[in-house]
Image (tube, helix red, strand yellow):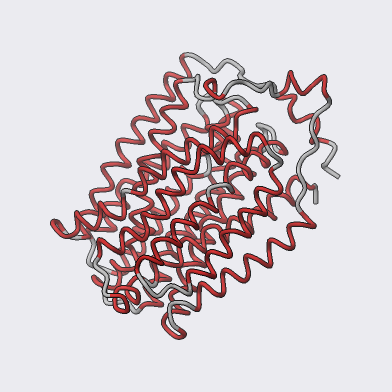
Amino acid sequence: MPYRWLLVALLWLVCLFNYADRQAIFSVFPLLKQEMGLSDSKLGLVGSSFMWVYALTGPLAGLVGDSLRRKPLIIGGLGFWSMITLLTALSTKYSHLVAFRALEGLGEAFYFPASLAMIAAYHGPESRSRAMSWHQSSVYVGTITGGTAAGVCGQFFGWRSGFYLFGALGLLLALVLIVTLRDPPPPPQQQRQAAAPLLPWTATFRHPLSLLLIAVFVGANFVAMIFLTWMPSFLGRKFGMSLAMAGWSATGYLQIASVLGVLTGGVLADNWARRRADGRIRTQALGLLAGVPFLFLTGWTLSVPLLIVAMTGFGFCKGLYDANIWAALYDVVPASRRSTALGVMNSIGWLGGGCAPIAIAWGAERFGFSACLSATSIIYLSLGLALLAGGRLLRASPLAPIHSQTSQHAYSTLEL
């Protein structure tokens, strides 16, 4: 196997723990609510504390990712957040939960800017969407793993058991990566300046389309965080599911479908991008617009079979969008500022997403969870139309090349 694809496989495992560790807490919300006497708003703050620290750390993580070697950043981040996951199991007070979730956000913030810039270094435009879509699939597998395992462990062994499990396995993986993960070699000096000139960070978002991609990401992340945070509790309250069943149902159908959607979106976007300037954005818009009826049905239906259909359909459409979040961004930002761009975009997106757990708790008290979930379809509709408009502008005024594709030169020798 060429190392560039082995790299994707290694980072796939890291990303799995990245999302399993953050998702596990949501499946045990009912146990935390009972043990510590927490309200929905306080539970929402537990979720938001992670997201806000994760978001605020994003720009720093991006700048560091463009300045330092990415291997130690990835391994160090994995080791740090895995240790915090272990410590979360020792929480006995509400303040402990909030503090440890915030620290977990700090550790996880450094992973995505470094890892996706590393993938982009090994994969040029002809395979970038596919490589990033394979990596993105671990987000959904990790979400399923974290939500389901935490629910099962919580039901049979107490809510702390899942955090012991994920924390220990994450530390073991960090040891494996010390031996197997390697940074790409720098290109020769004469090509380095032509391939990826180190531009000032203010040039990162010089193309206006990058700002549209960020705005759309904020909205899409807001919707995603509503489902990740509250779906297990929603299923338990509305359909009477057990802790383990709600943990699986809230993640399994949606995330498995997202795996299929993200892999489809990667192939589709790479093919479209060869023929049209807005190929990746067009794929994203397709996913958002197609997801509108499924989002509405998820909150509206009283039937479990229809709920499964709705969550599955939404998951597939979400995957089409997610496959190109970063690949589309990398089309419009300088190569030397990829980590910075991702860090800033991730920060803004998660600041918006961090409002979702509290917003849905506030809205549910007034309008009910079902109405709030259905209302998210309006957000998807607006975002999809905005991307279509941006794509038309891109076709009318194609992108000027902002970085040379010769940046792949140094990495082609690794396909051995």
Q: Nearer the viewer, residue 325 or 107?
A: 107
Horizontal side, residue 313 vs residue 270: left or right = left
Q: Nearer the viewer, residue 228 or 182?
A: 182
Say which residue appears at 86% left-offset and 45% top-offset.
416
Q: Identify the image quadrant of residue 271.
A: top right
Q: Residue 292: percent from the left, percent from the top? A: 31, 46
Q: Residue 238: percent from the left, percent from the top? A: 23, 70
Say which residue appears at 82% left-offset and 42% top-offset.
415
Q: Residue 390: percent from the left, percent from the top? A: 41, 24
Q: Nearer the viewer, residue 374 or 36?
A: 36
Q: Is residue 116 above or below residue 250?
A: above
Q: Residue 369: percent from the left, percent from the top? A: 22, 60
Q: Is residue 375 above or below residue 85?
A: above
Say which residue appears at 49% left-offset and 20% top-offset.
207
Q: Nearer the viewer, residue 167 or 135?
A: 167
Say which residue appears at 28% left-offset and 48% top-offset.
376
